[in-house]
Amino acid sequence: MSRRGIPGVGRPIRAYWRHRLGWVAAGVLAMAAQASAQHEVPMTPSDLVLEAQSISVARLLSAQSRWNAKRTLIVTDYRFRIEQTLLDGGIGGFEFVVTQGGGTIGNEGQDMTSNPRLRVGERYVVFLDPDRGEVFPPFVGGSQGIYRVDTNGVAIALSGNDRLMLSDLVSEVQSLLALRGNDPPLRVHRADPQSLRPMPSKTYSPAGAGGTVAGSRKPTAEDAPDIETPIPGEPLSPEANDAAEPSQDHVSTPDAPAWHVARLSNRPIVWDQWPEDWWVGHVDQAMMIKWNRIVDDLNLVSNSQLDTWAWQNDRFEMVGWPTNQMMIDQFGEGWGASTLAVAWRRWSGSVILEVDIAFNPAYCWTLDEFVSATQAGSCWGVRQTALHELGHGWGLDHPWEFYSVWVDSVMNYAPKQFRLPMLHADDTAAARTSFPGTASTNLDGLVSMYRTADDSASMQASYTGAFSSSTSITHGSSLALGGFNIENPGRTTFSNPKVEIYLAHAWRDWSEPYIYLRTATFGTTLAPVATIVHTPGGTTIPSTVPVGRYYPALYLRLTGDEDTENNSAFSSPNVQLTVNNVPATLAPIEAWRTWSLGRVGPSGIWRLNLPVVAGRTYELSLCNALGGGTASFDTLMSVVGVISNDDYCGLQSRIQFTSASTTMRTVEVRGYNNTAQGTFTLAYRQVVTDRIFKHGFEAD
């Protein structure tokens, strides 16, 4: 397994395994370091060993397609001959047969986009799933649990996310098996059919209407936009640090396509859409419109929308979240244990005749991209998954099943935090080439807050955030962003792209306050399909930026851009920049003094230094009537480790204390909550007691 996914790098393998088993015993699901599966729940390499019934190096001898027992799905039996047994698991030491959905009988072909492509005559490393059936992949984690071995002895995961020498893979599996011992396979990544969430679905009805659709219309997008108020206001004036940037790191216009299409649906495709009274109503249509911007009327929706669903009825159907029982009624088998979503496709020759798209209700699904793009979160994005599956619907395959990919694509298995409902240059090129002569977006630019690159340990592209981890910075310091992608998904060349750099209060939402820092101009030309990786110079954080936590954000401002939803890019939801001030030192005297101007932003804390002397009393005020202090927001003020105050005069704060020691204290001014923000002026003084009568009056 690749170095990034191997336990034992950084700590002993046995210690890792004890830790992993401890997690399992506690019922905690350990996810891969980069959650990057699209059709399956992501798994780490150790998960494959932990959950496998049998592990072997084997050669695929034959593949024989047949109808399943219900005659509702073509399945294929794959016969393997074992060359090396790593874990027997009761399958014997010579040959074994496994089955999965998809295959060809006569002129009819079927496939399931969750199922890996297997080639007769090839060698594989196989991690067999103990709960395998004959519909979903028989391997642990689907395509994650089977590696093809090429003629150079390189083992390549069919999920595309791992590549290494066979000898290294075998050695690591053997080390992990030694730690597992004789323990049976654990069911960690297993959806419990009894715990399926009540999600909307069309009803399975084998007698449901099929065949020609009676009327269709264009999809409508009443779904919320992907980016709130997608265009930040034009900067009023350039900042002093606006400048041309260094030359780009990497520009590529692929000589050969990075996408793959084997067969196509006839255009227009008429979908039986999700009912519009579902909580996801119109979301599927909004994703259809994204493809329609590239190929006019690629997707239409039915006027005779059905509330039933059946495979092999010659219709293109957005099924929803069918229950485990519906799956059994339809195919004789329930959902795959780790399957997230799937598109069933049926074709004759080079023409796709039917596609059904379904989501597994055993997992958490959300329309909130902040939640779905949170790396450690367990929820998956409805929009991005639907956009991906609709790509399968017209004929687009996973690019990494055919090429070593470095460019971005909605068909990639991107890490969770970089997985957004967006079409990239590779996707638009695929659609335009597959359906030539159709209207589409001409001028279009796209920017991401990450860079993609070729990954020598994977068939998939590597993803690296331009702002990859939360950090703090002080006024006057330089914000360093790493490289990020600029793409041309349109049909018109553009030059000298200008990328504005911002600090945003809210994630992917320009309707909340944001701070413009500067514009970076890159002296290059992007032809259609090109992707450029740029690394900007440093960006100074001026003292006028309120202290607080922000999402670094980019906006590609391109005059005449016909699709501005992809012109915005933000850091990941769990990655923020904290801006701090350089603390000024107060000099209290008997008379009131004021210090200004403090600026407090989201979750911000403004700090000041206060020198104090033991036995002396000090007063700090944001109350106008007490020394002339002011604040435009609900404040909370504290002397760290000594005293704090909230509402002394209305919503403002005031503190008085006598120091127990001579030292330097820190004064902090913040909002009462994360949304309380504004400016303040602090009044402060040293309170001097009566020098003559400080011990009281004594009569003669």
Image (cartoon, helix red, strand yellow):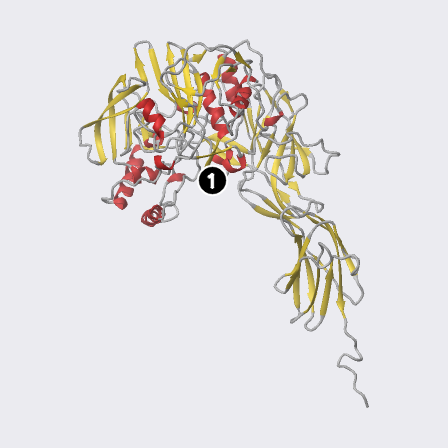
- The mark total stands at 1
Specify the farthest residue to the bottom: 700
Residue drawn at x 43%, y 40% is 33
Q: Position of residue 134 (x, y in %)?
A: 28, 25
Q: Position of residue 38 (x, y in %)?
A: 43, 30
| Quadrant location, the C terminus | bottom right
Q: Position of residue 376 (x, y in %)?
A: 46, 41
Q: Is residue 158 above or below residue 572?
A: above
Frontmost residue, 536 versus 448: 448
Q: Secondary structure at mark 1?
A: loop
Frontmost residue, 577 versus 208: 208
**Any part of residue 192 in sight:** no
Q: Is residue 74 above or below residue 141?
A: above
| Quadrant location, the N terminus | top left
Q: Is residue 464 above or below residue 470?
A: above
Residue drawn at x 81%, y 88% is 699
Instruction: Identify the amino acid type marked 1.
Output: Gly
Q: Which residue is mark 1?
A: 377
Q: Position of residue 125 (x, y in %)?
A: 28, 31
The reply, left or right, for residue 517 in relation to residue 366 is: right
The reply, left or right, for residue 99 in relation to residue 278 is: left
**Any part of residue 285 in sight:** yes
Q: Is residue 114 above or below residue 677?
A: above
Residue 328 falls in which quadrant of the image?
top left
The reply, left or right, for residue 596 in relation to residue 472 is: right
